[in-house]
Image (tube, grey):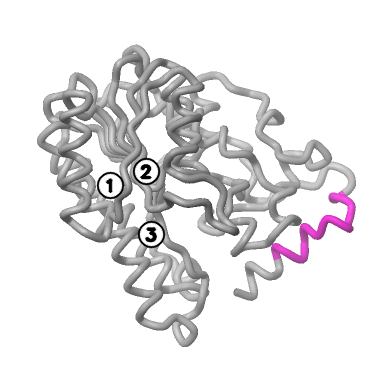
Amino acid sequence: MQRIQALSNQFNPTIAPPAGNVTYPWVMKYPDFFPFEQVGNLKGKTVIISGGSRGIGLAIGIRAAKDGANVVILAKTVDPHPKLPGTISSACAEIEKAGGKALGIQCDIRFEKDIQAAVQKTVETFGGIDIVVNSASAISLTDTESTDMKKYDLMHQINTRGTYLMSRTCLPYLKKSSNPHILNLSPPLNMQSKWFAPHLAYTMAKYGMSMCVLGMSEEFKGQVGVNALWPRTSIATAAVQNVLGGDSMMQASRNVEIMADSAYVILTSCHKKTTGNFFIDDEVLASVGVKDFSIYRCDPKFNDSQLAPDFFI
């Protein structure tokens, strides 16, 4: 937590952003370009998204909806939450406003019967599944002594087990798609102890999602594209607002659209050639010719080099 607090203090809104050409090691300087081979758009495709009622999951759904996709929102929030924006119904309204067809299903991905019922409803409604986005995640950035087993179990049940179960349940339908993808919102695997020590339980749970990418991409090679996507910087979500750093961190973040746009590139690429990768959002976009990332800054006063880093990069 000391590292997170240090970042929060660094980006206090009462302090002007750093002057001059200040750069930090998390800023993209020499992007790792990937040869994406695009195979059309998402018109008529069915995209099922766990944790899709808000934040990055919803943004990915809205981006798909702009092509005319069928977007299935799996979430728990039916009634408005005092601290969290969005409900299943409000998310569906945004999907339809963007041009897609929406299906909202109340679902707790910790329970197999919930996922099975949601997948069945999706197939009955739209005839199949083309894309799975595993966005649902629980977070507690606490050290070992501060993480009780209730928090530990919640993170592992949602992050690792939920991702595995969602992917496994959808596989029979994905294999029938012409360009199937599974996309996990999880970080690159890195076995350095510095990524584990501050929040061991959370890192284990998120890395479990990444291990699903590592294993499933090889297991289903040539059948389903399986990749991970992670942001280079902090992204302005409810988790950042409520857990990581409040208003100061939100100001020094990029918006959710950078993740949505980079996810779109991955999900419209050839599943046979784009698989087994741990992508970083701005490198994905740089690979397809994007050079100006200023449109993704939440606060124009902050240069790209002055943004808060994601803590797994």
In the rendered structure, find residue 213 and report the number of the disc placed on it. 1
The amino acid beneath tag 1 is Val
Q: Tell which of 68 and 88 is nearer to you.
A: 88
Q: Which mark is residue 206?
A: 3
**What is the crowding at mark 2: few (fewer than 14 residues within 10 Å), some, or many (at least 20)?**
many
CB-based contact (under 8 Å), mark 3 and mark 1: no
SS at mark 1 in the image = helix
Q: Earlier in the sequence, mark 2 or mark 1?
A: 1
In this view of the protein, can residue 33 be seen by the observer?
Answer: no
The image quarter in which residue 180 lies = top left
Where on the picture, by quarter, is residue 2? bottom right
| Amino acid type of the residue that numbered disc 3 sits on in the rendered structure | Lys
Query: Disc 2 marks which residue?
Result: 228
Q: CA distance from mark 3 to mark 1?
A: 11 Å
Depth order, front residue of 274/165? 165
Query: What span is in magenta?
Result: 7-18
Magenta stretch, main secondary structure class: loop
Left or right: 174 in relation to 259: left
Above or below: residue 228 compared with residue 62: below
Q: Position of residue 195 (x, y in %)?
A: 48, 66
Residue 192, percent from left and from top:
44, 66
- Give how far apart the Cα atoms at labels 2 and 1 are: 7 Å
Q: Are marks 2 and 1 in contact (CB under 8 Å)?
A: yes
Residue type indicated by callout 2: Ala
Taking the spot 17% from the left edge, 27% from the top edge, the residue there is: 128
Q: Is residue 33 left or right of residue 258?
A: left
Q: State the image quarter where residue 240 is shown.
A: bottom right
Secondary structure of the residue carrying numbered label 3:
helix
Indicate yes or no whether the magenta region holds residue 13.
yes
- In the picture shown, does residue 82 fall above or below 94? below
Magenta-drawn stretch contains 116 = no
